[in-house]
Image: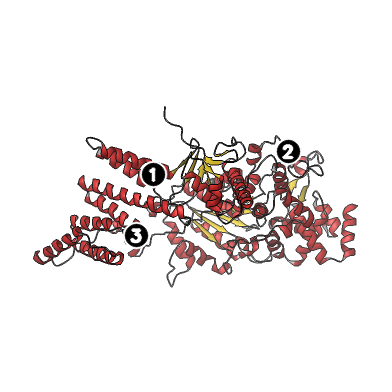
Amino acid sequence: MPPKTPAWRVRLLGTLEVEHEGRRIARFRAQRYGILLAYLALRPGQTHGRDELIELLWPDADGDTGRTRLRQALASLRRQLEPPGTPPGSVLVTRGHVGVGLDPANVGTDVADFEAHLRRAADAAAALPPDEQEQARRLQAALDVYAGPLLPGFWPEWAVRERERLGAAHVDALRRLAALREAAGDPVAALDLARRAGLADPDHLPALVDVMRLLAATGRGDDALRQFDTITHVAGREGEAIPAEARALAGELRRRRRSGPPARRGTPPPPPEASIPGLPPNASAARGGERALTPRLPPVPLAPFFGRETETAQVLDLLRDRRRGARLVTLTGMGGSGKTRLALHVARQWDEAHGGGKKDASSSPVCVFVPLVDVSGPGALPAAVAGALRLDLGPGRAPTEQIVEALSRRPPSLLVLDNFETLLGDRMDEPAGAAFWVVTLLQSLPSLACLVTSRQRLLVDGEQELPVPPLPVPPSPPDPLPGLGAGGPEEEGVDLAGLLAVPSVALFVDRAQRARPDFQITAGNAGAVARLCARLEGIPLAIEIAAARSNSLSASALLARLDEAGRFPLLACRRRDLPPRHRTLRAAIETSVRALPPDLQTFFARLSVFRGGWTAEAAAAVCDLPLDRAEDALAQLREHSLIEATAASPTLHPDGDDAPLRFALLETLREFGAELLEETLEEDEAAVLRERHAR
C-alpha cells in the first residue's frame, strides 16, 4: 500500500510558502513566525524544546518575554495551518510545555523530497552493477524539485549553513548528471547541465572546468579558451591553483588552432527566422510591411476573483449570440462595484474559449484590454486602442483606418474598453464622439465585439447593457446581546462552509488574510463578518478596504467603528497601486456624483430623504418638480448607475407589467446623498423635504 501523501507541503527552496488543497500561504504575521515554521519543517518529526526555539528567535529576550512571544507565534501559525475544521494538533504538534514540532504524517517539504531523490541516486550508483538509468532518473527528479536556494532573504546562521549545504548538493547533482549524459554520448545535454552548475556557483572551479571540457568536445574550441580565461580569473581571485586539466586542455586547443587549416571565407546562411530565439512568429511578414499584431494581453489580477458566475455566463452568452447583434456589451455600475475585475475575468474566459495563446499568432483571435482612465479625451481613443494593439501608426492615413485594416485579417476578436465614462462628457446632451467611434469600428469589423465598462451607458444603437450589482451577502444575523460581544454563544454552530460560499464573505476573508495572514473565520467571528458584509451591501471596493483594516481591527471592532463614525471615515486605504478615486469609498462615489450637472446633483441629494424606495410620482411630490422632469432626472441617474429601478410588487399593484417602477438607493449612496444635502440646502429647506416625505 503506497504511503499517504502529506496534506500540507512546505516549500523552502526558492521561496517560503505552504500549500494545502490548492490554497497557498506565502505571508506570515511576522517574519520570525515564518522562520519558526521553516526551522520546524526542515526537521519534520523532531521535537524542539521551547527554550531552544526562544534562543533561536529571540536571543535577547528575558524568560517571560520569550515564552510569551513563542506562544503568540505558535498561536498565529496554528490559525494558519489548522483552520476551522482541521483537527487540533494535526499539523503543529506541541508536547505539553516542553516540545514543539510538525507532524511528518501530515507535513512534507521539498527539501525532504530533494534529499530523498539524492539518496536513491546514490543507492543506484552503489549497486552492483551500477544502475545508471535509475541514477539519472533520480538525479533529474532531484533537480526538478530544486527551485532555488533555500529560504532566500532569510539570514539566520542555521539558514545560511543549510543553504550552503543544499546548494553544494545541487551543484554536485548537476555535475553527476552531466557526467552520465556525457558518458551516454549526449555532450550537448551534458554541457547545458554543466553550465547550470557553473551559474549556480560561479566560484566552483570543477564545474567551470566541466564547461570548458564539454565546449571543446562539441567543437567550440574558441569558446573553451574563453572559458579558460574565466577559470584563470576565478582561481586568482580565490587564491587557488589553476586546475591541471584546464591548463592541459588550453595548451592542446592552442596547438590545434596554430596547426589547423584556415577558416573558410563566408558564413553559413542564417537559420530561418522562426527558429531564432526571441524573434516573434511571422516576423518575416512583418518586415515585409504586413506587421503581425502582438497586442498586450489583459492584465492578470494578483488576487482571486469571487462570485459573478451568473454575470460571467450572461456576458459570454451575449458576446456569442451574433444573431441578436449583441456585439457591444456595456457593464454598468457605481464606482467600486467590480466592473473592471468582471471584464478581465470575462476576457480570460473568452480568450480560453477561442484558443488564445496559439503558436501561430496570425491565426489567433485578439483579446485586447484598453484602460481609458488616463486618456485625455474622445480624440485620443484611436491612439489608445492602437497602443494596446502595439500597432505602429503610419503617417498619411487615419488611425481608425489602420486599426480596421489590422483587425480585419483576424478571426473574431474582443476589445475591452475600461472606464469609458471618462470619455462621455459631463452633460448627457453633449455629442458622444467616443461612443460614435466605437459604433463606427463595429460597423467596419463584423468579426469584432466590444466589452465596455462604464458608470453610464454609451446610449448608442446596438448597445446591450448589463448592470453589475453588488456581491451577494449572507442573511445578517441578529446583533449580539449587550455584553456578549461579536463572538457570543449565540453564534456557535454556525455553518462556516456555507458562509464562506457567499462571495462577499469569501472576498472579505481572502483580503483579510492578505492583510493579516493568520486571519480565519471562526464560530466566534462569523456573525460579525456576516453583519459587516451585509452592512457594506456587498460592494467589492468597500469590502476590500474594510478587510485591509483587519491587521489592526477585528470584525466586531470594524462594525463598531461603522456605527460610531459612519462608513466613509473608516473605508479608506493606503494602497499605492490603486488610483486616487478607488482609495476611499467616498472618492469612488464622489467621482460619479460630481460628474452630474449641478441640478441633477441637487436632485440626487434630495432623494436621500427616501427610505425603502419610491416611485416617480413620489419623487416629483417630495422634490417639488413636474412629473416629466422628475422622470427624466430619474432616468439620467439610472443611466449613471446611481439608483436602481425595479418593478413594483405585484401584491401592491395587481396590474402586473403595468405596475409603476420603483426606484431605490443603496444605503451607501443614500448616506453620501444625505451629506450632500446638508452641504447644498439650508436647514429649513431640508426640513421641508423631510416633511413632504413624511406626508
Mark 3 highlights which residue?
278
Alpha carbon distance from label 3 to label 1:
33 Å
The kind of secondary structure element at disc 1 is: helix
Expressed as whole percent of the image width and height from the top left, the position of residue 404 reads 46, 61
Expressed as whole percent of the image width and height from the top left, the position of residue 361 reads 39, 54
Q: Amino acid at mark 2?
A: Glu
Alpha carbon distance from label 3 to label 2:
59 Å
Indicate which disc, 3 or 2, sits on the residue closer to the N terminus.
Answer: 3
Mark 2 highlights which residue?
491
The kind of secondary structure element at disc 2 is: helix
Expressed as whole percent of the image width and height from the top left, the position of residue 410 reads 42, 54
Residue at image position (46%, 55%) is 157
Q: Residues within 10 Å of mark 2 (few under 14, many from 20)?
A: some
Expressed as whole percent of the image width and height from the top left, the position of residue 604 reads 77, 59
The answer to whether the residue labelled 3 contacts the one labelled 2, judged by CB atoms less than 8 Å apart, is: no
Indicate which disc, 3 or 1, sits on the residue closer to the N terminus.
Answer: 1
**Where the N terminus falls, by quadrant?**
top left
Q: Is residue 133 above or below residue 415?
A: above
Left or right side of 606 for 14: left
Q: Nearer the viewer, residue 437 or 684?
A: 684
